[in-house]
Image (spheres, grey):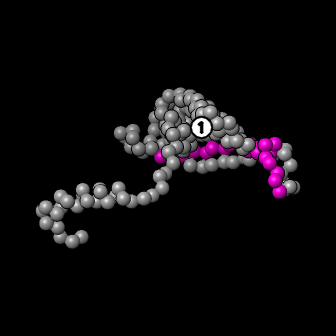
Amino acid sequence: MWPLSGKQKYLVLPVLAMLSGLAHGQELPVQNLYFPDYALVCPAFTGKENCYTIGLIDQHQWFGIENAPNTQVVYANTRFSPDKRVAKNYHGLGAMAARDINGPYSEMAISFTYSFHVLLSDAGNVHLSMALSPSVSQKSLSQSTFQNFNNDPMITGERLSAWNPNAGIS
């Protein structure tokens, strides 16, 4: 960078701070639904804490508006170690059931998680964690409230649904 004099060095930071206020950008969405337990974001966190974790999330949006989005999640996970003598390796088990409804679209999912953790440091703060997470979900679309203005043959007024198996490794 160019050489700055003593007084110029103290002016650069405030000027950059004021210019950043003029910048425009898109704000990233806040995923407030997942903060109660990091295992909901990344299955490799399942069993990270040395306790049972059980939770229930009930999130409703846009109060007073009919068919507004709402989400319910119930989850549980725990840590276990089959061999108590080896404290460096432990396992985690978890399960989650979720329901998400947004107008005519709804999704229900069930997920199970197995994780394996290896302690890499003697201080106990560095882990190598891996997880396998199979799940199944049902996605549904109810066309009963659709208005068929153009006589579209694909809009039959019935409820369409599909089951989707899935598996993830993290």
- Residue 86 visible in the snapshot: no
Q: Quadrant of residue 121?
A: top left
Image position, residue 87 (x, y; %): 46, 35
Between 97 and 19, the one nearer to me in the picture? 19
Rendered residue at 42%/59% (across/down): 24
Please give the range of residues in magenta.
128-150
Quick check: 58 left or right of 141? Answer: left
Rendered residue at 81%/42% (across/down): 144
159 inside magenta stretch:
no
Residue drawn at (60%, 49%) of the image? 169
* Closest to the observer, 110 or 152: 152
Label 1 element class? loop
- Residue 22 in view: yes
The residue identified by callout 1 is 62
Compare residues 55 and 15 and report the one nearer the observer: 15
The residue at 50%/38% (across/down) is 35
- Where is residue 59? Give x, y as percent: 58, 34
**Can you say whether 7 is above or below 106 in the image?**
below
